[in-house]
Image: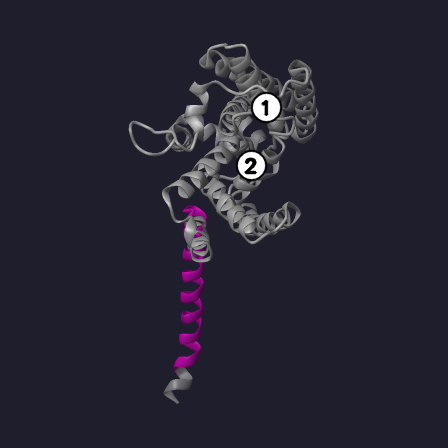
Amino acid sequence: MTSDTLSPVQTPNAAATRHMTWSRFKAWVFEVPALQVLVVLTLAGWLVATMPAIANPRSITSILVIASLLALAAMGQTLVVILGGLDLAAPGYILFGAFMAANVAGKLAVPAVVAVLITALVCGGIGAMIGWICHRFSVQPLVVTLGTGAAITGATLFLADGDYSSTPPAALRSLATLRGTTFGLPFPPIILIVVLCGVVVWLFLNHTVAGRRFRAAGINFRAAGLTRIRTSAVWTVIFAASGGLAGIAGVFIASFGSGWSQTIGEPYLFSGLAAVLVGGTIFGSVRGSYTRTLLGALILTILSTIIVSNGLTEAQSRIVFGIIILAVVSLYGRERHVRDRF
């Protein structure tokens, strides 16, 4: 009798406790990239278990360098996605950066610093123009960036005039080579460069007024405009940063490979966007961050290593990446829609 009378009271309490536990777990997953860290550790354990020979400093450095290059190429894309857009001109920017590293800094012996500055200015200027046009005329960035990317690619190939044999100078190659050292430590400078970039972006997004205004513009640029945030300036600056950063990434990518080709930037469009989404940054997301993109790049690099070691083809690996992206978007996209948009 006593059990029957307590049952109706205990059941709602138990259900409320379970609901509260689940809510806290979801909040933890969305607020902190703990899920991505867990995936990284799981994949790393799987890789070492299936390929014990890879657990050596040279192989680990190689994975970190490749992940760093992918994260650098996806840095600008991260900012654009947080803003609610998409930059399909990234392959063109990367190709131009690779051209500047190999044919200008390498072949013409222009100082490496000058070549990098020219790359940042040209790609950043084109990106700024794209951002202004998209905001001013309410044009989808998907269309403008796709056309601009094709134009940049064509112009770069015209400037190259069929010369793909040049290589970046030693000063640039030393920054991305696997045998490079950083302040005497046995890892190449590109890893430290990407980590420092991550710290700068984190400080910008979380500890500056400009970062808060940028996030507000990404959530709802019309509402942000009503609060006197200059959304046109935000779009211009963010797309300029995306172009400049992708161009600089092209410089390092060419330096890592000691050369370049017509298609050097193409793999980084899909992989870069995948790194952003797998990291948990969704279009217009309030919780998007470059830290998540770094983890996403590491996840994809380790996963690619596992895929290659198991003999999967490029097409099969893209299928795997696509399934992962769909799973992540279904998880993070719905949460953003329910909690952040309203």
Q: How is the image coloured?
A: one colour
Helix, strand or loop for the magenta stretch, by majority: helix
Residue 224 is labelled as: none
Q: Residues within 10 Å of mark 1 (few under 14, many from 20)?
A: many
Q: Quadrant of the N terminus?
A: bottom left
Q: How many marks?
A: 2
Marks 2/1: CA–CA distance: 13 Å
**How far from the left and from the top, in percent, is residue 340?**
51, 43
Where's residue 200, x and y in %? 39, 28
Q: Is residue 313 visible?
A: yes
Report the amino acid beneath label 1.
Tyr
The residue that disc 1 covers is 93
Question: On screen, 152 above or below 211?
Answer: above
53 relative to 217 in the view: left or right: left
Apparent side of residue 162 relative to residue 204 in the rendered image (left or right): right
**Residue at figure coordinates x 48%, y 31% from the top left:** 72
Q: Is residue 132 above or below residue 143?
A: above
Mark 2 and mark 1 residues within 8 Å of each other at the beta carbon: no
Kindly identify the residue that appears in the image at 40 percent across and 43 percent down. Answer: 60
Magenta span contains residue 22: yes
Q: Earlier in the sequence, mark 2 or mark 1?
A: 1
Using the rendered view, name the quadrant where residue 235 is placed.
Answer: top right
Q: Residue furthest bottom?
A: 1
Residue carrying label 2:
272
Q: Amino acid at mark 2?
A: Gly
**From this viewpoint, is residue 27 visible?**
no
Describe the element under mark 2 as helix, strand or loop: helix
How busy is the neighbourhood of tag 2: few (under 14 within 10 Å), some, or many (20 plus)? many
Residue 78, percent from left and from top = 52, 34
Front one among 214 and 58 = 58
Part of the protein shown in magenta? 6-35
Q: Is residue 75 found left or right of 164 in the rendered image?
A: left
